[in-house]
Amino acid sequence: MILIAHLGPPGTYAEQAAVFYVNWLTKNSGVEATLCPYPTISQSLHAVADGQAHLAVVPVENSIEGSVTTTLDTLWQLDSLQIRLALILPIVHTLISCASGLDKIKTVYSHPQALAQCQGWLEQFLPTVQIIPSNSTTEALQRLEQETTTAAIASSRAAQLYKLPILATGINDYPENCTRFWVVSQGDADAGYQASTTLASHTSLAFSMPTNTPGALLKPLQIFAQRGINLSRIESRPTKRSLGEYLFFMDLEADVKETQMQSALGELTIHTEILKILGTYNVLPISAFT
C-alpha cells in the first residue's frame, strides 16, 4: 500500500488528479494506494521528503494563470524529490452556495488560482462581493450551510462530496482551462510510478547563475538550441537572497538519458552556479484514464 499526499481537504482538483492517478496505477501495476490530504501544497511535498508519504500529486501550471510558484519553490528547496510523471487535468469551475440566488451572495472563497481563473465572471455577475483567498478550493465548503450569503468556487465533484447546491457551472473565463500536475517521489523510489520504461518525453531542471551579467541566460539557451533540444517552458523565480537575483526553471522535450541531453547538461554545469535535475518523465492526459 502506497500513501499519496495531495492538497486537501477532499474535493480539490489535486485530489481529483490523484484519484485518476491511483486508478491508472491500479490498472497498470496492481498497486493499491491511499490518499492523504494536507492543508498546503508545500506540506504535501514535505510529507514525501520526510517519509510520511510515498508520492505527492501537486499542481505546477495552469493554462490560464501560469505556474504554481509554491510547487516550484518547494521543489528547489527539497533536494531529495524527483518528478515521476505529469498529469493534465481539464478544469471546470462551479459556484457553490446555499444562497437562494446570486443577488444574496456577499462573500466568495477559493484558492487564489481559481479566483483568478474566474475573475471576469465574478466581475460580471458578482461585482460587489468580497473575494477571500483560501488554501484550497474546498477549504470553505464546510461553512456554507451556516453562512447562506457565502459562496465558494470549486469543482462539481466537490459539491457532490459535500452535498451542496451549485448556483452556476463552467464559470472559468476560458473554457479550455486545464492544469498540469506532477507526481513526485523520493529520488530513489520505484520507477513503477512512471508511465513507461521507455525513453521519457520531458525533463525538468532548475539552475541559478553565478553572476547577473549581460547574456548570462543566453548561453544555457544556446546549449540546448545547438543540439536541437526543444524548450517547452522557461520560468524565473527570485532566489530570495537579494532583489534582482533569479533561479530559472526549464522543461525540455527530451529524456535525461539521451546522448544529446547528457552532452548539454555537461556543458550547462560550467555556466551555472547550482544545477538541479528535477526529473525526467512522461505526460499523461487525464482522458487516458477513461
Image (cartoon, rainbow, N blue to C red):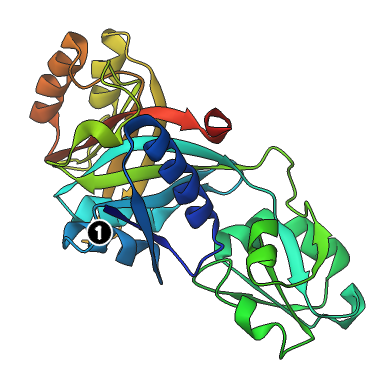
> Label 1 is placed on what type of residue?
Ala
Against 105, is 211 above or below?
above
Question: Who is closer to the viewer here, 166 or 127?
Answer: 166
How many marks are shown on the rendered structure?
1
Direction front: furthest residue: 30
Question: Front-most of 251 and 59?
Answer: 59
Q: Which residue is drawn at 73% across and 89% down?
A: 147
Q: How crowded is mark 1: few (under 14 residues within 10 Å), some or many (20 or more)?
A: many
Q: Quadrant of residue 40?
A: bottom left
The C terminus: image quadrant: top right
Query: Image point 28% across, 40% down: which residue?
Result: 83
Q: Which residue is at a point 18% across and 38% down the rendered structure image?
A: 190
- Which residue carries the number 1 mark? 53
- Residue at 57% x, 49% y is 65
Measuring from the top left, give residue 257's x and y in whole percent: 17, 18
The percent coordinates of residue 153 (x first, y second) are 68, 65
Q: Is residue 244 among the parts visible in the rendering?
A: no
Residue 233 on image: x %, y %: 42, 31
Q: In which quarter of the image is residue 34?
A: bottom left
Asked whether residue 283 appears in the rendered view, the answer is: yes
Up-down relation of residue 207 to residue 219 (above or below): below
Q: Describe the element under mark 1 as helix, strand or loop.
A: loop
In the image, residue 178 above or below residue 79: above
Residue 113 % position (x, y): 57, 58
Residue 268 in which image quadrant: top left
